[in-house]
Image: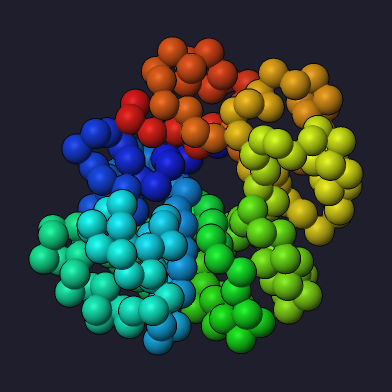
Amino acid sequence: MHLIHRGIVSKKYHENLLKSFEQSFKKGFGIETDIHATKDNEFICFHDFTLTRIFKRKESVKSLSYLQIKNISEKQRKPVPTLKNLLKSSKNKYFLFIEIKPTFSIKQIKKLLNETKKYKKCVFISFKHKNIFNILKLNKKTKVGLSFSPPNSVRSIIQKSKNKKIDCLILDKFYLKNKKINEIKLNKYFYTIKKRSEFKKYSKENNLIFENL
């Protein structure tokens, strides 16, 4: 199974926008997206910890309410969707790999699980593995994955993959050709494939998180 990275179907579809997600679904793909919690604890689909890169403003996501972020983003024609918007748009038909960017509190994780409980194709992933293990403490049946990037050692990835409660690994494409990684029995998703040549080369034998193809 392949997923579109942040809904970037092509260069005209910007990252983590509802219209990008909907276009991904029209193409028949699930998506990988990122979430943060706003000051008023709304979950939004947004990658960065601040608005600097996308909106040229130095405020942090966690210091602003969703209404403030909504107003800023709509003025710049890049409306930031809530996770609720995405869930509704997916119609429970497409896989949503939801990457938790910050470390969430237990209260926030409870809210997250409650918001997504009717959506069976959500997979929660994070580089901050504490998020994943806290999710499993609250609901061991939740689909989860651990994310890794260099310089994580192959040994540490193999060790963590032995946890039977983990459903998948999210791995930088750096690890694609590693024999020991390929021997791991868990489902593995390699990110971020940005070249058509790479997609053609690896898509038959691997699950890929890709964009701009």
Residue occupying image coordinates x 67% and y 43%: 148
Residue occupying image coordinates x 46% and y 68%: 36
Q: Position of residue 17 (x, y in %)?
A: 28, 55
Q: How many marks?
A: 0
Foreground of the two, 74 or 13: 74
Tell me if 213 is positioned left or right of 197 in this view.
Answer: left
Tell me if 31 is positioned left or right of 66 in this view.
Answer: right
* Residue 36 in view here: yes
Q: Quadrant of residue 69?
A: bottom left
* Residue 92 in view here: no
Q: Quadrant of residue 136?
A: bottom right
Foreground of the two, 65 or 27: 65
Q: Is residue 65 above or below residue 103?
A: below
The N terminus: image quadrant: top right
Q: Position of residue 80 (x, y in %)?
A: 28, 64
Q: Is residue 153 above or below residue 138?
A: above
Q: Is residue 203 above or below residue 10?
A: above
The C terminus: image quadrant: top left
Outermost residue on the front side: it is 58
Q: Is residue 46 above or below residue 68?
A: above
Q: Position of residue 67 (x, y in %)?
A: 25, 81
Residue occupying image coordinates x 39% and y 18%: 196
Name the image colouring. rainbow
Residue occupying image coordinates x 47% and y 40%: 3
Q: Position of residue 129 (x, y in %)?
A: 71, 59
